[in-house]
Amino acid sequence: MSQKPDYQPGQFQWSFLLPQYWGIWIGIVFLMILAILPWAIQYRLATVLGNVAFKYLKSRRKIAVRNLEVCFPEWSAEQVQDKVRQVFIDQMIGIFETLNAWYCPEWFKNRFNVEGLEHLQKVQAEGQGALLLSTHSTLLDAGGYLCEQFFKMGVVYRPQNNPLLDMLVYRCRANIFEHQIDHDDMRGLIRLLKNGQAIWYSPDQDFGLKQGVMAPFFGVPAATVTAHRRLMKISKAAAVPLYFYRDGDIKDPRYHVLLEPALDNFPSEDEVADATRVNQIIERQLRIAPTQYMWFHRRFKTRPEGFEKIY
């Protein structure tokens, strides 16, 4: 679990110059160098690194394999292995895409488009905030950068355990997101929603039943968070599905931002029905580009009584 930092986000501390942090500074310089490499080299490096990760990160590979076996039973064992390998590669490509968004955003020029922007504009024109229901995409902050080319939004984040890393990530994201909200700062999040802001929120991970309910995900019972229902009831915000993905030739990729109509009668009085509805939206989104999702987390960690463990 991430620990809440005892300093202001993005704040520099002289202690960051101590020898214990030198390795991180060297790593940051290395990442900046990677960010200025031509895309042809970046995606080749990402492919090599993805294949290495697929081979040696065995525990993560097993989790991803089980997730895809459960969610896509129509795929053969060979197809699952191929898809999981591509998940690792897409994750590495996503790291380079995020570095480009942080340090070389001009690379994305003329490579992206948006569909459904009118749905968000309608919500905000009516004075409502928008909770953008999205996923943990391998595009990472590159997806946020793409969205910011069309509309302003904030993001909910978990502080890094290392204070220097937390400062660096916060500052890089400050060039992308209008607001960064600590996941513990519910008052700040509600205030922004009440003020008509759009906030990126991903309710697609298993945090147990203390924070959610069991609802089908790809037809399998999964612990699904419900915190967004309370946020929306208090803030009177609307829920607007958001998805972004990459397609086309990897040598010359194109990026798409997809916004769907705000959900009507949401939240309802039935939290299981609401969780099921959100899961169905996420399922539909993930089928567009299945390997551009972080299948490494144990989505089915919590199991109903009487059901066998998946992992």
Image (cartoon, rainbow, N blue to C red):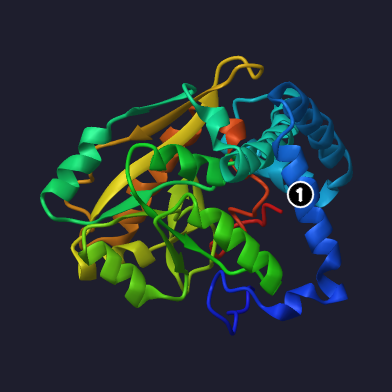
Q: Residue at x 82, y 77 (%)?
A: 18
**In x, y percent, where is residue 305?**
55, 65
Residue 257 rendering spot, x and y as whole percentages: 40, 32
Describe the element under mark 1 as helix, strand or loop: helix
In the rendered view, tell whether residue 170 sits above or below residue 108: below
In-image side of 251 versus 281 (left or right):
right
How dense is the environment of label 1, judged by Cα within 10 Å: few (below 14), some, or many (20 and up)? some
Q: Nearer the viewer, residue 211 or 304?
A: 211
* Residue positioned 67% across, 33% down in the render: 90
Picture quarter with the C terminus: bottom right
The quadrant holding residue 121 is top left
| Residue at 54% over, 27% down | 246
> Would residue 24 be seen by someone viewing this image from the given angle?
yes
Question: Residue 241 versus residue 159: which sits nearer the camera?
Answer: 159
Quarter holding the N terminus? Answer: bottom right
Instruction: Report the side of 189 relative to 193 (left or right).
Output: right
Foreground pick, 122 / 180: 180
Does 46 sit left or right of 288 as displayed? right
- Residue 87 placed where, x, y %? 68, 35
Residue on which disc 1 sits: 60
Residue 259 point in image, percent of width and height: 32, 36
Q: Residue furthest bottom?
A: 6
Q: Foreground residue, 5 or 52?
A: 5
Confirm whether residue 289 shows in the render: no
Q: Is residue 277 left or right of residue 246?
A: left
Where is 89 relative to 185, above or below?
A: above
